Image (cartoon, helix red, strand yellow):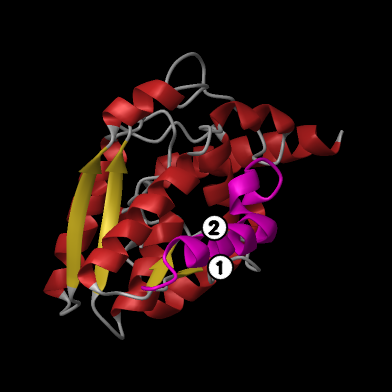
Amino acid sequence: MIFSGGLDSTTLLWYLARKEKVYALTFHYGQRHSKEIEHAERIVDFAKSKGMEVEHIIVDISQVGRLIAKGALFEGEVPKGHYEDPMHRATVVPNRNMIMLSIAVGYAVRVGEREVYYSAHRGDYANYPDCRKEFVKAFDTAVYLANIFTPVEVKAPFLDMDKADIVRLGLELGVPYELTWTCYEGKERPCLSCGACVERTEAFLKNGVKDPALSDEEWRKALEIYERFRNESRA
């Protein structure tokens, strides 16, 4: 599976690892929020302490990242506001998911596995084309044709869920959300106002629980920011 150390992929890790061994691939591609890699390591250590069998591989594709580096995840300002606003397309990294998934497929063939997972979900549809059903279906077909003698299936089990649905599932599974990292700024603490942070706030709010990764003061501020951006998006 593709594992960033974020909310969605950590839920997917718990969803899979409670039943079977998981190979979790975390990619360093030059992203400004590479802090997520540290969080991915902590999460895997925690998963292992709970008896889960996880093999964690950190994949350095930063040289590839130089070729596809474009937008707010590399330089310039990270857009603030409601996550479905088209301005957040500035955070799209060209072909990122296809590159990561292709590497994961190759690795799956090598170790004799038949399935590759990633945590695309319905909330990504507006601004991330490689998180849509059409992409998953087309890419899965291409993967089959490219590996016809050693078939691998690409799966995205959260495609019909939004982030609130994922958090609901994660709460049931006991996912350690306090260890996850979401913010695109990648600073010492979450900015609370980038699209990723705002969507995360909404997900916990809809489940009636505080984000465990935030202090009480940060949570209060996150709710204020969320309400402001939501009102602006409705205007």
Q: CA distance from mark 2 to mark 1?
A: 6 Å
Residue 75 appears in the picture as rendered: yes
Q: Residue at x 51, y 41 (%)?
A: 197
Would you say residue 127 sits in the magenta stretch? Answer: yes
Residue 30 appears in the picture as rendered: no
Instruction: Tell me the magenta residue range.
Output: 124-150
Residue 87 screen position, x and y as percent: 68, 27
User: Element at badge 1?
Assistant: loop
Would you say residue 173 sits in the magenta stretch? Answer: no
Q: Amino acid at mark 1?
A: Phe
192 and 71: which is toward the camera: 71
> Which picture quadrant has residue 165?
bottom right
Work out which residue is located at the far bottom of the displayed protein and give it.
Answer: 19
Q: Residue at x 34, y 51 (%)?
A: 103
Give the number of the disc on residue 158.
1
Instruction: Provide the major secondary structure of the magenta segment.
Output: helix
The image quadrant where one finds the N terminus is bottom left
Residue 13 screen position, x and y as percent: 34, 68
Q: Residue at x 25, y 48 (%)?
A: 39
Which residue is disc 2 drawn over?
120
Residue 161 screen position, x and y as percent: 63, 67
Q: Are marks 2 and 1 in contact (CB under 8 Å)?
A: yes
Neighbor class of circle 1 (other Cα within 10 Å; few <14, some 14-19, many 20+) is some
Work out which residue is located at the far top of the displayed protein and give it.
Answer: 76
